[in-house]
Amino acid sequence: MGLQELCRLMSRFNSYKRTNIILQHLKMSNHTDAAAEVLLERKGCAGVITLNRPRFLNTLTLNMIQQIYAQLKKWEQDPETFLIVIKGAGEKAFCAGGDIRALSEARNTNQKMLQDLFREEYILNNAIDSCQKPYIALIHGITMGGGVGVSVHGQFRVATEKSVFAMPETAIGLFPDVGGGYFLPRLQGKLGYFLALTGFRLKGRDVYTAGIATHFVDFEKLGMLEEDLLALKSPSKENIADVLETYHAKSKTDQDKPFILEEHMDKINSWFSANTVEQIVDNLQQDGSSFALEQLKVINKMSPTSLKITLRQLLEGSSKTLPEVLTMEYRLSQACMAMTFMKALGQPGSPCSSFVLPGETPAILSPAIYHFAYTEQLNIALRKNCMTQLAASANGINSYFCLSSSVRILRKSKQLIFVLANLQSFFYV
């Protein structure tokens, strides 16, 4: 081998080494970025979880869910950890839900990621519910979808005057998951059904009054509350509850303000006691009041199939345990993401039939649970136009908007085929 050939090979080898080094740095950089999405820290007597994606309103990714679950289990077994606190970075949001942009991309390229994300998110929701240590969620700011899932199942939930709660899934062709089928029908009267079907937003003290939060604390005192909780010495659940109750009692913001839906609750309980979406629509039409017609207008903008799924989900969930509801919701989530319900239902080995929570025996749910989703007649009053475009432009700070979202509902014989098309993002600016 001549000297020139040797030099050429050495040059190629050095280039190869440089490329490998660059790739390793890129991998390390990606890992660091992913790790920074959620901060898991021991502070004082507590384990503190900080959802750390303020630019994206702390929306949840699969990586975050996996890290939180693993650490939650470690802290649960740690005798030096007496409580667990979860909060969101920044002042806009606790957590605005799951990362829908990532879900949309994965739907086209990585079906397994979709299965893993929903499965592991619901397993985390169940772990929070059964956590042996007091779990305190500081739900300041936007708390929607997946953010509700990592808070509402905990023992303590602290709202502030800036809290915004909603389950807006019927507007984007899904359903209020993360255990929504369990906690929503257990709210006062038919409030949960109303919130689920209309996506109505509760703000500030109303989040507490509705039963979503267990305590209300002024935002300016939230940091002090956290410090006092972390400073407790080997606290019992009662010690923690006493601290929370003390701050709650001192909070005077909107203390005398009536619940935003108080004057309508009797009618809400009547309208939403129906067992079909069609009857709810009839109830609203027959009432004819301005509030009833306003809700009818909102419902008419929602996906009809999502409305039917959501109502049945809550009716079924009202008598089920949380693990049973999460099992049902996992199967529904996979049916939605499979583009057509028919593709995923009742097939052995399909995602819809393989979800089991840790420690649970496999539940057998009849496909009849979902049968309503595509065999009932579509009421023409719900949707005259089978194409629903969900789009609105951002209007500065504090604007909700959907980007290029559309839901198509096609009718073929007596079957409804549900398609999520161009679903990109739903977030708060």
Image (tube, rainbow, N blue to C red):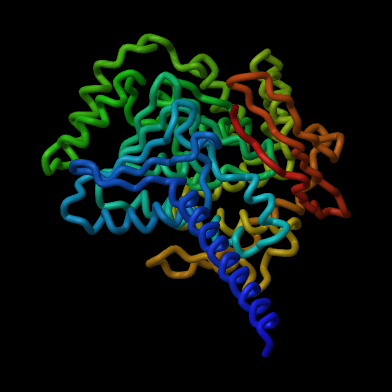
Q: Nearer the viewer, residue 107 or 22?
A: 22
The correct choice, above or below, for 346 with respect to 246 in the image is below
The image quadrant that residue 217 belongs to is: top left
Indicate the position of residue 39 as horizontal and vertical percent values. 38, 45
Name the residue located 51 percent from the left edge and 24 percent from the top edge. Answer: 202
Dividing the image into 4 quarters, which one contains the N terminus? bottom right
Residue located 46% across and 52% down the image: 32
Relative to 311, say whether 229 is above or below. above
Does residue 197 sit above or below 321 in this rendering? Answer: above
Direction bottom: furthest residue: 1
- Please tell me how many numbered marks the rendered image carries: 0
Q: Position of residue 49 (x, y in %)?
A: 35, 44
Left or right: 44 as drawn, with respect to 379: left
* Horizontal arrangement in the rendering, residue 339 relative to residue 228 (left or right): right
- Work out which residue is located at the far left of the displayed protein and give it: 233
Which quadrant: the C terminus?
top right
Q: Give the residue displayed 70% in from the left and 43% down from the top.
A: 424
Vertical placement of 244 versus 62: above or below? above
Q: Is residue 314 visible?
A: no
| Horizontal side, residue 391 vs residue 220: left or right | right
Q: Position of residue 415 (x, y in %)?
A: 81, 54
Question: Do we see residue 42 in this rendering?
Answer: yes
At x 52%, y 63%, the residue is 24
